[in-house]
Structure formats: C-alpha cells, structure tokens
Image: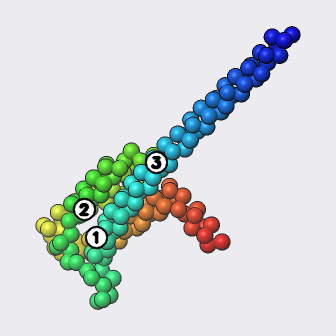
Amino acid sequence: MQNIDKVIPIIATLSGIIIQALINHINNKRLYKQQLIAQIYEKRITAYQTLHKKTVEYKSYFVKFIHTGNEYVEVKDSSEFGPMTITNEIIQVFYDNEIYFSKDIIKEFWDMTNNIFSLNSLAIMNCLDGSFEVKKMVSDESANAVKLIEKFQDELKKSLGLSELEKIIKL
C-alpha cells in the first residue's frame, strides 16, 4: 500500500505534464494556422489592392474617350484610341497576383478583359477609317468598357467583404 501511495502522486504529476503538453501542442497548432491564414489574407488584400488600383487606371483610360459634350472634361481624340497596351498591363498585374484571387474573381476578370480586348479591332478600324461613325463607336464602346470595369470593381469589393462592411458601417 505504501508503494501505491508513492506512485499515485508521480502518476498524477506525469499525467498533468502529458495533458499540459498535449494542450500546448494543440494550441500551438491552432496559433500556427491562425498566423498562416492571417499572412495569406494579408497578401490577398495586397493583391486585390494592386489589381483595384490598376482597374482605376484602366477605367480612367476609357473615360477620356467618352464624349459627353462637356467642354470642361478632358476628352482625347479617337485617333489616340489604342487599348492594347493598358489591357496588357492589367493582365500582367492579374497574372502576378492570380494565386490570391477567388475563382469568381478570376472568371469575372476574364469576362471583363475579353469583352474589352475586342476593342483593339475597333482601334485598328479607327486608324483605317476615322469617320464620324467610327469615332462615335469609340466613345460608345469606351462607355461600355467603363461599365464593365465598374462591375468588376464591385465584384472585387464583394469578394473581400467590403460591400458587407459598407452596409454595416451605414447602419
């Protein structure tokens, strides 16, 4: 009986040490996962910010070709219309950060750029035939491109949860 009395405290102490070690291991694993998720999310936010910044430039490019009749708004002549370079730039930004984008954003991005990329043929047509009708098409199609870009920007916000955050803040 005396041996059991000596063994029980040792077993209890060892059991406590083992249980504490397991708890520490589980907590360390959880902490590691949380840190990993935080780091990836931070990189994802940076990728979204970079792409959003480029979409602002992209939109600004097309806005300059929309003829609104307002003499105070800078409007470029349709002879300068050539969206291939800026489209290639936004595609490069996308490729550089693609790993961080959701499947929905990837799909929306390609929908937007494929629709806008077709404007390159309009640019070529504009160089060959600078008629009023073609110039009007440049203005109209630039307005459509702006709408597509704005839709994509909304999807970026939605994907990051910023749309929901805006609703909460307004309450």
Q: Which residue is mark 1?
A: 61
Q: Residue 122 in the image: state x and y as whole percent.
A: 23, 64
Residues at discs 3 and 2 in contact (Cβ within 8 Å): no
Query: From this viewpoint, is residue 116 visible?
Result: yes
Q: Position of residue 21 (x, y in %)?
A: 63, 29
**Secondary-structure class at tag 3:** helix
- Across and down, in percent, residue 97 comes to 35, 50
Q: Nearer the observer, disc 3 or disc 2?
A: 3
Circle 2 SS class:
helix
Q: Is residue 78 above or below residue 4?
A: below
Nearest to N terminus: mark 2 or mark 1: 1
- In the image, 132: left or right of 162? left
The residue beneath circle 3 is 39
Give me the disc on residue 140.
Answer: none
On the image, the x and y values in percent for residue 60 come to 31, 71
Q: Are marks 2 and 1 in contact (CB under 8 Å)?
A: yes
